Image (spheres, rainbow, N blue to C red):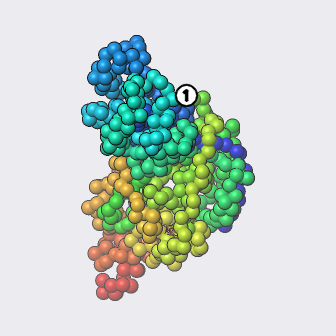
């Protein structure tokens, strides 16, 4: 048993989830579904000023439709109204929207009347998330009156004109907007923060990949985290790499000298439905190997951060980094009593990846523990591997026994494995937070058809080459034929019938002793169940 103590932590920073996601290059943004931010609202709502704040916070380009029109005409907006009339201005507005096609997400600010034409609203929605900046009529009028170049207020009774516009436009803004942000009593910076917070709140539902910044927080900054780190206990069985990497885990500087921040990423792999193949396989292994899928995505982000002057080390699962702890610090989720990380919207079905970078980025806040009094995962565990909240005896965990363990599975634990042939999801399936999980948009993780029609005993006939071929690009290839057929034998020992005995007898003569021993055990189990006449 080792106790992973609080590692030496440098005070670093991370970007906020939304600002980082939106500042990624176009290729990545397509994948992550990051969109432009389009601000609409009455004059006086603060669209231009808030747009500038958002530009500063996200690093995105700012596009102002009024500025483009004024530049095209070569005169101020008030003069366009006076010289060419409102209709001509509205035509120009529509033309600008038709031509706008930013090659990456941007902050788009608009004139107050842009929603008057229904066609414009469709164009705005295509451009990005439409955010309506609101306030009460009096506040808006008071703000709008501070500038005397508003063409529509250059009338005898501007307050009445404003009131009419307000009454006419409010319902149009409401129907055009994806989000509404009340600006009353807020500074422009506070409104921009509120917008980013709202988008961040919604982000896990939309993109397949959730990007959140993860600061390596200073140990004085987060006592809760430190307490948690100090009590995480891994009884780590054969997983010697954990001990080997402990020194590196203790200090990210050992991994990347000059590291200032960690960016943690989560990728939803939930596919819904039930296990379709004979023998249960953990959900994460139904489709393609997540390492390959995520590494390709990380390379794009790495390239982008290089352009910003950063040096990076990227890890998916395998690196010497305490990924769940960093993910919790970054606000991706909290440590469940099952020891898995939980996210309010994704449940437990997500992969983690980390990018250590020399860039200094502002940190996010850690997520709040929401397990409450629930202990369903502990009760659901078939082997009693979760010995107490947040404590896992890996040597009893079926995921460890069927994936990490290279040698024979202990005899006393074999009957508890049931028909599981690769991993175990029982503690995850039991978790109530998974009722919020949505099916991932990442198609690489959909279940393979090639194994759906196979009976458990069919796996025992696989040669080395056939095994490699069947599980090409699958996480299952990791345990190799010897480990996988060992698991199949255990499952057959638990659920097999008389019909499985011929295949098991052939496996008992396999040249691989590990398979032969487990096949012999399985035969005994079946004979004990069906009787000696079999
Ligand atoms: S994966 Fe299975 S065996 Fe391991 S802790 Fe969870 S329920 Fe228990
Ligand atoms: S099952 Fe309950 S205790 Fe376990 S991780 Fe989920 S919410 Fe927390």
In the picture, the quarter occupied by the C terminus is bottom left
Please give the name of the residue rendered at 29% of the width and 66% of the height, measured from the top-left corner.
455
Please give the name of the residue rendered at 32% of the width and 62% of the height, measured from the top-left corner.
273
Residue matched to label 1: 307
**Residue 29 appears in the rendering:** no
Which secondary structure lies at badge 1? helix
What percent of the width, then of the height, locates residue 82?
35, 17
Q: Is the CB–ligand 2 distance for label 1 below 8 Å?
A: no
Please, is residue 22 above or below residue 425 in the view?
A: above
**Residue 237 appears in the rendering:** yes
Quarter residue 74 falls in: top left
Please, is residue 443 above or below residue 528 in the view?
A: above
Q: Nearer the viewer, residue 106 or 305?
A: 106
Q: Nearer the viewer, residue 477 or 20?
A: 20
Decide if residue 386 is on the left or right side of residue 83.
right
What percent of the width, then of the height, locates residue 27?
42, 33
Q: Nearer the viewer, residue 149 or 133?
A: 149
Please give the name of the residue rendered at 39% of the width and 30% of the height, measured from the top-left corner.
157
Please, is residue 267 above or below residue 273 in the view?
A: above
Furthest residue toward front: 156
Quarter residue 92 falls in: top left
Decide if residue 254 is on the left or right side of residue 426.
right
In the picture, the quarter occupied by the N terminus is bottom right
Decide if residue 240 is on the left or right side of residue 520.
right
Q: Nearer the viewer, residue 158 or 348?
A: 158
What percent of the width, then of the height, locates residue 90?
30, 25
Badge count = 1
Please give the name of the residue rendered at 34% of the width and 31% of the height, measured from the top-left corner.
114
Decide if residue 363 is on the left or right side of residue 463.
right
What percent of the width, then of the height, locates residue 436?
40, 61
Question: Circle 1: is it few (<14), some (14-19), or many (20+) Cα within 10 Å?
Answer: few
């Amino acid at each position: 048993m080792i106790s992973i103590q609080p590692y030496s932590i440098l005070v670093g920073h991370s970007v906020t989830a939304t600002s980082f996601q939106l500042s990624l290059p176009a290729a990545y943004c397509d994948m992550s579904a990051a969109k432009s931010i389009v601000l609409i609202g009455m004059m006086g709502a603060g669209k231009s000023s808030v747009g500038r704040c958002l530009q500063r916070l996200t690093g995105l380009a700012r596009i102002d439709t009024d500025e483009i029109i004024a530049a095209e005409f070569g005169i101020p907006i008030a003069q366009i109204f006076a010289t060419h009339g409102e209709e001509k201005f509205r035509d120009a507005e529509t033309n600008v929207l038709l031509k706008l096609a930013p090659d990456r997400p941007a902050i788009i600010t608009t004139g107050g009347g842009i929603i008057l034409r229904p066609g414009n609203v469709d164009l705005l929605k295509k451009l990005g998330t439409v955010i309506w900046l609101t306030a009460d009529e009096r506040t808006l009028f008071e703000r709008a009156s501070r500038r005397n170049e508003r063409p529509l207020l250059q009338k005898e009774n501007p307050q009445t004109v404003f009131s009419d516009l307000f009454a006419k436009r409010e319902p149009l803004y409401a129907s055009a907007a994806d989000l509404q942000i009340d600006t009353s009593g807020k500074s422009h910076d506070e409104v921009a923060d509120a917008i980013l917070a709202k988008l961040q709140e919604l982000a896990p539902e939309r993109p397949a990949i959730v990007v959140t910044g993860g600061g390596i927080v200073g140990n004085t900054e987060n006592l809760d985290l430190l307490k948690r780190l100090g009590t995480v206990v891994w009884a780590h069985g054969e997983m010697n790499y954990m001990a080997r990497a402990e020194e590196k885990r203790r200090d990210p500087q050992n991994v990347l000298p000059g590291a200032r921040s960690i960016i943690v990423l989560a990728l939803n792999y939930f596919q819904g439905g039930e296990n379709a193949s004979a023998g249960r396989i953990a959900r994460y292994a139904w489709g393609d190997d997540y390492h390959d899928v995520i590494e390709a995505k990380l390379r794009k982000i790495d390239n982008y951060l290089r352009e910003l002057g950063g040096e990076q080390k990227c890890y998916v699962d395998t690196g010497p980094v305490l990924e769940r702890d960093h993910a919790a610090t970054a606000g991706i989720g909290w440590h469940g009593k099952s020891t898995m990380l939980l996210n309010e919207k994704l449940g437990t079905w997500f992969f983690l990846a980390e990018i250590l970078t020399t860039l200094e980025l502002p940190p996010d806040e850690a997520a709040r523990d929401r397990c409450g009094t629930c202990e369903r995962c502990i009760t659901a565990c078939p082997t009693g591997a979760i010995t107490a909240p947040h404590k896992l005896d890996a040597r009893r965990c079926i995921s460890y026994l069927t994936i990490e363990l290279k040698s024979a599975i202990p005899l006393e634990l074999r009957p508890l494995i049931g028909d599981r042939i690769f991993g175990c999801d029982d503690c995850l399936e039991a978790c109530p937070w998974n009722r919020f999980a949505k099916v991932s948009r990442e198609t690489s993780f959909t279940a393979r058809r090639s194994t759906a029609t196979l009976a458990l005993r069919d796996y025992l006939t696989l040669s080395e080459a056939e095994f490699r071929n069947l599980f090409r690009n699958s996480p299952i290839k990791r345990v190799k034929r010897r480990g996988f057929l060992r698991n199949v034998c255990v499952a057959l020992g638990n659920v097999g019938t008389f019909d499985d005995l011929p295949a098991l007898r052939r496996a008992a003569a396999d040249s691989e002793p590990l398979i032969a021993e487990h096949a012999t055990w399985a035969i005994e189990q079946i004979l004990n169940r069906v009787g000696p006449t079999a």
